[in-house]
Amino acid sequence: MADTDEWLRVRDYLQQHRHELSASAAARYPAAQWAEGTALLTTPSWLPAAPLPLGSVALDWADSDGTARDRDAAAWDAALAAVLPRRADGSRYRRFSSAVADLAPPAIWEDRRTYRLTGADLAGPRPALAFEPGTFFQGVDIGGALGHEHAAAVMGLLPREDLRALVGTPWELGRRPATVAISTLTLRADGAAATFPLHWREPGRVSHAGGLYQVVPAGIFQGVDDGPAGQAHDFDLWRCMTREFAEELLGTSEDYGPAGTLVDYGAWPFARRLDQARAGGSLRPWVLGLGIDPLTLATDLLTAVVIDAPVFDELFGAMVDRNVEGTILPGQPFTAELIERLTTREPTQAAGAALLRLAWRHRDVLLGPAAPG
């Protein structure tokens, strides 16, 4: 158990060396589990043979208490204690999220209801994702601690990674709270050529993957409102992606009204225009797979949204160059050369690197004439 100074030193090391630490964490797992040769961890049932139309992926829901199962409470408590600091009065923090809130809060740091992933099959005859209720801090309390533990071990401050050993195989989702982000590669298609915006995630402004490039938009799969009605209303991948497009590429607010307010997507002009383009085939959303960041075990649904150039320009002509999480780099060429550089020589988030490679492998489908539902 560290004091706050040592804990902050480890956290600073993690922030400065996240890309290298992700690679060293990935090395703890067999190379066969790396998606497209990147650091993102995956398993065969999470990678469809070809891109799936977004509408073909079913979402299953089960009410539960949202806690991880099959835990040895004493072993987990001891492993967490090794990465949680003591306060000045000698008491120790009980949750990783509480230590972050007091000692090193990002610009955005709040607990929210989320849809916690409990199962996934994207390669079978019925592609589906299964969820139950969860919270953002439930994921941070394990995932953030895992990343901190690995950084401390690399620095020689911990002899072993007990918490990672307890988590076990990353896709045994019942052993940890798995909060899911939807990471989207946004392709502006102009015939056989395409470009895409790229996000530089600024350290200190984000709770995950600061100091890395990432596709954009990317955001936690959750509802706008924490109430039961809001959670049910927004339990939809496309609605979450729609909000992220507006927030990350157009800089709109995450405030959609007073507590208890349900977003009227049909009356929202931006959402309505996206839906019209999707229905008409000039906007085509796909699911390419699911993967896990090796450092924190953050889980990402890998999606691509292909938008014909005239529609893209209409929707995103006012694209911002900065948002609350970092800098937007527009117009990156979707070419083998750039993808090779981003995935081998630049600090790119594991999910983004795997998604770029998967998209390039499936470029004939993504940029072809097919129009998914």
Image (cartoon, helix red, strand yellow):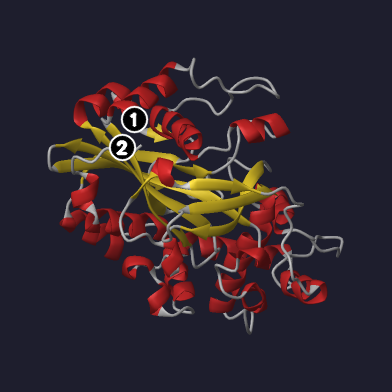
Residue 240: image location, x then y, percent: 50, 36
- Between 224 and 13, which is closer to the camera in this rendering? 224
Give, as a three-letter code, the residue at label 1. Arg
Separation (CA) of disc 1 from disc 2 = 6 Å
User: Residue 284, which numbered label?
Assistant: 2
Disc nearer the start of the sequence (1/2): 1
Give, as a three-letter code, the residue at label 2. Arg
| Crowding at mark 2 (Cα within 10 Å: few <14, some 14-19, many 20+) | many
Quadrant of residue 289 in the image?
bottom left
Tell me whether the residue at label 1 lies in contact with that at label 2, contact meaning CB atoms closer than 8 angstroms: yes
In this view, which residue lies farthest toward the bottom?
Answer: 159
Quadrant of residue 74 in the image?
bottom right
Residue 86 position (above or below residue 62): below
Residue 21 position (above or below residue 57): below
Q: Which residue occupies 37% across, 54% down?
A: 352
Residue 199: image location, x then y, percent: 37, 44
Give the residue pinned by disc 1: 278
Assign a secondary structure to mark 2.
strand
Residue 201 position (above or below residue 268): below
- Between 235 and 126, which is closer to the camera in this rendering? 126
